[in-house]
Image (cartoon, grey):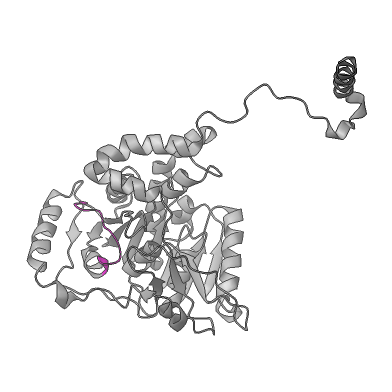
Amino acid sequence: MALFMDSRLILRRVTDLRCLTPRRHRVKEKWAATRAKLPPTRLALQHFDATYGVQLGPLWPSVRVAMLSERKYGALLNNFSYDAVQADLQAQGCRDFISNRVEEEEEEEAQPHLEQKSEVEAQESSNDVSMKMFDGQQMNLSPNIKCLVFPRGDVTRFKSARPDTHGLLSYYLMDAASVLPCLALDVQEGHSVLDLCAAPGGKTLSLLQTQTIRFLCVNDMSVSRTRRLRKVLHSYVPKQFLTDENLRVTSFDGTKWGEIETNTFDRVLVDAPCTTDRHSLMEDDNNIFNKIRVGERRRLPQLQLDLLLAGIQAACPGGEILYSTCTLSQNQNQGVVEQAVCLARENHGIHLQAVSLRPLIRMFRNTFHFAPDLHLGEMVIPHLAANFGPIYMCKLKRLS
C-alpha cells in the first residue's frame, strides 16, 4: 500500500513539472469561448424565416428545405473545346434542357389562361412600369448555348471537367438557372454587349458560347474577382478570341459606368451583387450576414439601384437591359427595378418598357420551378425535385 501511494505521489509531481515540457509544446488553457454564439448562417436563416415566410407564404417551407439541401448543377458545354463530351454526359443520363424545352405548340391549351393572367399583371404593374407581352410570339434562343442537367429528382453530381489537348476545359459547372438570364438577353449577330458585374464568369462564358457577339465588355469592381474571371476565361476560351478587338476586361466601379460610356451597348447584363441566399445559408466564410458586415448588407439595395441605372445609361436607344440576382428578396429584386425605371425617367429622361419573360417559363417549366404571380420579372425558386436557383431576372427595353 505504501508503495502504491509513493508511485501516485511521484506521478503527480512529474505531471506538475512543466519545466520538463518544451516551451513550444506548452498550451495555455482557454477560459473564454471563442466561437460565436450565432454563426452567420444561423443569422441568415433567422432573417429569411422572418422575411421570406411572409413574402412567399405557404411556399416558404418547401423552398427552405431545398435551400438547406445540396444544390443541383448544370454543365455548360464549351464550344471552344475540342473534346466532344456531350455524348458521354448524355450516356450518364444528362440532357440539354435548352434543346429539350417545351415547344410552343404544346402550350396551346394553357395559352388562354396565361394571356389572361398577363393582362391582369400588366394592369396591376406599379410605378407606371409598362409591360410588353410576347405571349403570342416565340423567343429566339441561341442554338449554340448548351447546358446539360440530370433529370428532375436526380441528384447525381457531375465530375470535374478535364482539359483537352489545347488545355481548354470542356464544360463549366454552374447553377443551370444562371443560364436563363443569358438566354433572355436575346443576343443577336453583331451585337455589342456589356456584362457589368461579370465575376466569377459563368454568365460571361454563356454569352461567349453564342458566338454572335461583335464586342463583349466584362467588368467587375473587385480586382481579386476580376483576376479570377481572367483565369476562367483563359481556361475556356482560346487566346485568339481574347484580343482587345473582341473582348475587354475591366475593374471599374460599375456604378460610375454611366459617366464612362453612355448610349453604347445593344445588350447590358446587370447581375448585381446580393445576399446570395444559398451561400449565406451554407457557408460561414465570406458570409454577408456576418455581424461586421451589417452596414454592407443594408447598403445592397442602393448599390443594386446604382448599378442598374448605370447599365440603363450604357444601353443605346432600342437596347435591352437584363437585371438579375440570386436572392429571393423583393427589396433587391422588384423594388430595385421599380425605382430604377422611375429614376431613369425623372433624372435622365430615359423611358423604359418591361419585357415579359413568360415564354421562357413556358419553355423550361419542366426543368425549373418558377415563382407564381410576380408582377415584375420572373424568378426560379428552389425545389427539392429541381433544386436550382434562386435566380431573379427582369428585362427592360430602352425606348429613348
Query: In x, y percent, where is residue 297?
Result: 45, 39
Report which quarter residue 354 is drawn in: bottom left
Report which quarter residue 383 is drawn in: bottom left
User: In this rendering, is residue 9 above or below 314?
Assistant: above
Q: Is residue 392 left or right of residue 192?
A: left
- In front here: 227 or 50? 50
Outermost right residue = 20
Query: In x, y percent, where is residue 353?
Result: 23, 59
Q: Can residue 39 be spotted in the picture?
A: yes
Query: In x, y percent, where is residue 272?
Result: 42, 52
Q: How many marks?
A: 0
Query: In x, y percent, where is residue 155?
Result: 40, 62
Residue 385 is one of the magenta-drawn residues: no
Q: What span is in magenta? A: 364-375
User: In this rendering, is residue 173 above or below 252?
Assistant: below
User: In this rendering, is residue 281 above or below 93?
Assistant: above
Residue 367 is one of the magenta-drawn residues: yes
Residue sitting at 68 percent across and 21 percent down?
Answer: 31
Report which quarter residue 17 is drawn in: top right
Q: Is residue 29 left or right of residue 255?
A: right
